[in-house]
Image: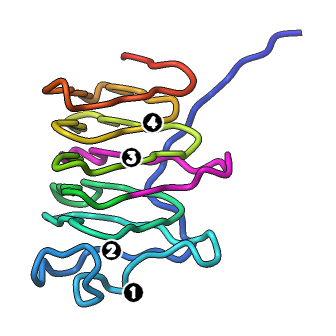
């Protein structure tokens, strides 16, 4: 018997999702920034898609999946706030840099992020670049894959005030 494994990543699922449509004031928690309101995990089905620059500076946000840089370059800066994606073990990846775009997550000023999708794809697909930078804060990341399918994946930990925990294995290439 011959077995194999094929990992397929596609864009965000067709479940409830909110995409950044305008920078508004740049605040992640401002409903005017999103086409379907601020993503939430009240039913465990919201996806957040960020294709411009946003920040989360206080409070927290929990939702099913996070995609940064899907149809345009995107950046999310977590400055002291808290960001949590699905920690239920569902089959939902978090994706940074997809479809030839750049997706950047920056954690600083004591910010916290838990990326709990089944994998975290950092730089997926030809011409895509995914960047995660932890300057001063905490990152817990599940099964990070850096540079999938000829993409570029970068993870920076830039000072001693940064704390990074990787669950499952880190994969490069």
Mark 4 or 1, closer to the camera: 4
* Nearest-to-viewer mark from 2 and 4: 4
Going from N to C along the chain, the mark reached first, 2 or 4, is 2
The kind of secondary structure element at disc 1 is: loop
* Residue assigned mark 4: 141
For the residues bearing labels 2 and 1, Cβ distance under 8 angstroms: yes
Q: Quarter of the image for the C terminus: give it.
A: top left
Q: Residues within 10 Å of mark 4 (few under 14, many from 20)?
A: many
* Badge nearest the viewer, 4 or 3: 4
Q: Earlier in the sequence, mark 2 or mark 1?
A: 2
**What quarter of the picture does the N terminus occupy?**
top right
Q: Which residue is the site of mark 2? A: 19
The residue where tag 3 is placed is 95
Inter-mark Cα distance, 4 to 1: 27 Å
Q: Which labelled disc corresponds to residue 36? A: 1
Q: Is residue 144 magenta?
A: no
In the displayed structure, 166 sits above or below 43; it is above
Q: Nearer the viewer, residue 162 or 63?
A: 162
């Amino acid at each position: 018997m011959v077995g194999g494994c094929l990992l397929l990543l596609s864009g965000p699922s067709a479940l409830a999702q909110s995409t950044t449509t305008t920078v508004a004031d740049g605040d992640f928690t401002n409903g005017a920034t999103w086409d379907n309101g601020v993503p939430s995990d009240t039913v465990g089905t919201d996806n957040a898609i960020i294709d411009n620059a946003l920040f989360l500076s206080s409070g927290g946000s929990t939702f099913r999946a996070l995609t940064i840089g899907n149809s345009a370059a995107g950046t999310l800066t977590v400055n002291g706030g808290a960001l949590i994606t699905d920690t239920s073990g569902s089959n939902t990846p978090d994706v940074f840099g997809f479809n030839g775009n750049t997706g950047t997550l920056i954690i600083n000023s004591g910010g916290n992020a838990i990326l709990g999708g089944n994998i975290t794809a950092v730089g997926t697909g030809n011409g895509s670049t995914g960047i995660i930078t932890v300057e001063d804060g905490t990152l817990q990341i599940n099964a990070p894959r850096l540079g999938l399918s000829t993409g570029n994946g970068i993870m920076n930990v830039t000072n001693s005030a940064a704390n990074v925990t990787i669950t499952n294995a880190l994969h490069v290439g």
